[in-house]
Image: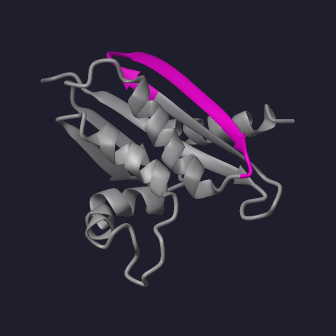
């Protein structure tokens, strides 16, 4: 059995969609029984941006990209885009939605999609949020704790 890297990532935003807000992201990476936790925070952001950034930062932290990677997220926005391949339609439409509006967070989607291409064996899984999935709950806690570092 080939060893694989497991990632749980999550984002959070305090006062989401308000003028003054704080967001955080967190990720837990597992490989051969070792655990690595990473997190960060930004001001004036959105929950969706933090969800994307959590995944980006986790994938950037992977040193051996030839290993299989399985990413777990409770974000419907992130999971649905990747699993249902919304991004292909966006690319064909010049990064516009079906409603002819600019795709939100294009900068982060471009980063994530470019990074995803560097992993020959990567899979994404949707997990239910706040449903006692231990590592998902830990990623959520890391994201919420990161927000507190902004004061």
At x 36%, y 23%, the residue is 62
Which image quarter is the N terminus in?
A: top left
Quarter of the image holding residue 59?
A: top left
Q: Position of residue 116 (x, y in %)?
A: 29, 41
Principal secondary structure, stretch drawn in magenta: strand
Quadrant containing the C terminus is top right
User: Where does the magenta region start and end?
Assistant: 29-44
Report whether 75 appears left or right of 18.
left
Residue 31: % across, % down? 34, 20
Which residue extends farthest right? 151
Q: Is residue 31 visible?
A: yes
In front of the other: 71 or 150: 150
The answer to whether residue 130 is visible is no
- Along the line of sight, which residue is nearer the eye, 27 or 106? 106
> What sort of colour scheme is used for the picture?
one colour
Quick check: is 91 in the magenta stretch?
no
Question: Could you tell me which residue is drawn at 37 percent across and 16 percent down?
Answer: 33
Q: Position of residue 49 (x, y in %)?
A: 57, 52
Q: Is residue 32 above or below residue 141?
A: above
Q: Is 33 contained in the magenta span?
A: yes
| Residue 52 x %, y % | 49, 48
């Amino acid at each position: 059995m080939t060893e694989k890297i497991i990632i749980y990532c999550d984002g959070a935003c305090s006062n989401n969609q308000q003028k003054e807000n704080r967001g955080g992201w967190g990720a837990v990476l597992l490989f051969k029984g070792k655990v690595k936790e990473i997190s960060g925070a930004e001001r004036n952001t959105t929950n969706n941006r933090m969800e994307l950034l959590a995944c980006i930062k986790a994938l950037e932290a992977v040193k051996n990209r030839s290993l299989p990677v399985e990413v777990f997220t409770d974000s419907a926005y992130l999971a649905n885009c990747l699993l249902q391949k919304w991004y292909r339609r966006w690319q064909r439409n010049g990064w516009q939605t079906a409603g002819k509006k600019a795709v939100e967070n294009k900068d982060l989607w471009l980063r994530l999609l470019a990074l995803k291409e560097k992993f020959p064996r990567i899979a994404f899984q949707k997990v239910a949020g706040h449903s006692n999935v231990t590592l998902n709950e830990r990623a959520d806690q890391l994201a919420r704790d990161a927000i507190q570092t902004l004061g």
